[in-house]
Amino acid sequence: MTPKYIDVHSHVNFKVFEEDQDAVIRRALDSETWFFNVGTQIDTSLAAIKLAHRYQEGVFAIIGLHPIHTGKSFHDEKELGAEGKEFTSRGEVFDKNTYRELLKDPKVVAIGECGLDYYHMDEESIKKQKEAFIEQIELANEVKKPLMIHVRNNYEDESKNAYIDILEILKKYAKVKGVIHFFEGSLENAKDFILIGFMISFTGAITYPPRKNGRNCEYEEIIKNIPLNMILSDTDSPYMAPVPYRGKRNEPSYVKEIVKKIAEIRGLSEVEVAKAIVENAKRIFDI
């Protein structure tokens, strides 16, 4: 079966979905939506694999180490649960051998989410993030699977740019392609990634009004000016629910609203854009 929609980046494997996980997944599958659950460290990566095996088709896993989990970080109840919320999440050292074994599972289609997150940054954190990122790129090269890239800037400190740093690292080390998830860079950034074969994925943020605090991404300009065959859609569930669900817990079935907005911006039918995105995802993830 070929789905109508595809959400290339979600986290239904997170604790926030624990009580109604099956209902959330069933809503997605019933709406002809396939999706990838993305790991952020070893526990959520294992959970993504376990979840993918509960369904015959339409649910896949991506495993890896998120840059914020390379050191102690803010505790996210949605991701890790309420217990121990006064503490920070543990730092994980990327274990290439452990992840290599997990990548043998046929339900695992990519490595990530990996990359750089400069939102809370210091030199030691950036050093650890880059080391873990390069190791994951090297493993992706070895097993010939694509990368799911996380990138976030610190908008109060423009002395460092995560988009530029990630591009340089990918050019130097990557032999595989992948996805720049939750894109909020510039048109120039998008074109640079596309030139090296990385697709650009958009979230529910494209349905929000423009920001007034200097962080606004020119989504319409970008979506109009990059090739349709390099565009993907992702919910980043449980975060960033698109309009009309903004403020609620996000889920994969809402990806339709992101596709609808991309179609509106490009002046195309929703059916045409949905079909293109599904084909793009099938091509990059070899599913």
Image (tube, rainbow, N blue to C red):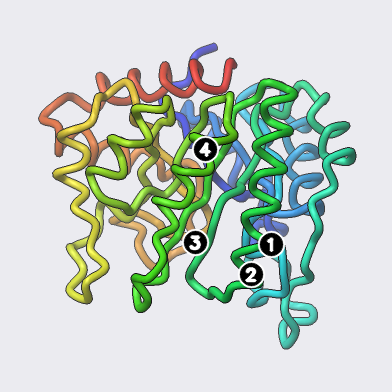
Task: Please name the amino acid that badge 4 sits on.
Answer: Leu
> Looking at this rendering, what residue extends furthest in the front direction?
172
Q: Quadrant of the C terminus?
A: top right
Query: Does residue 28 sit above or below 47 in this rendering?
Result: above
Separation of marks 1 and 4 at Cα, in angstroms:
16 Å
Q: Residue at x 29, y 56 (%)?
A: 244
Rendered view: 155 above or below 170: below
Give the percent coordinates (x, y) of residue 278. Answer: 42, 21
**Nearer the N terminus, badge 4 or badge 2?**
2
Looking at marks 4 and 3 on the same chain, the residue that comes earlier in the sequence is marked by 4
Q: Which residue is mark 1?
A: 128
Q: Do the residues bearing badges 1 and 2 touch, measured as CB atoms within 8 Å?
A: yes
Could you tell me the amino acid type at mark 1?
A: Lys
Mark 3 residue type: Arg
The crowding category of the residue bearing disc 2, from other C-alpha atoms within 10 Å (few below 14, some 14 to 19, many at least 20), is: some
Quarter residue 241 falls in: bottom left
Query: Which label is found at residue 249?
Result: 3
Residue nearest the observer in this picture, 101 or 16: 101
Q: What amino acid type is highlighted by mark number 2?
A: Ser
**Mark 1 element type:** helix
Q: Say which element carries label 2.
A: helix
Residue 194 spot, x, y in % from top left? 35, 30
Q: CA distance from mark 3 to mark 1?
A: 31 Å
Observer-nearest residue: 115 or 27? 115
The answer for how far apart the CA atoms under marks 1 and 2 are is: 5 Å
Question: Which of label 2 and label 3 is nearer to you?
Answer: 2
Q: Residue furthest top?
A: 1
Marks 2 and 3, how far apart at CA:
30 Å
Q: Secondary structure at mark 4?
A: helix
Per the image, the residue denoted by label 4 is 170
In this view, the residue farthest toward the left is: 267
User: Residue beneath label 2, please?
Assistant: 125
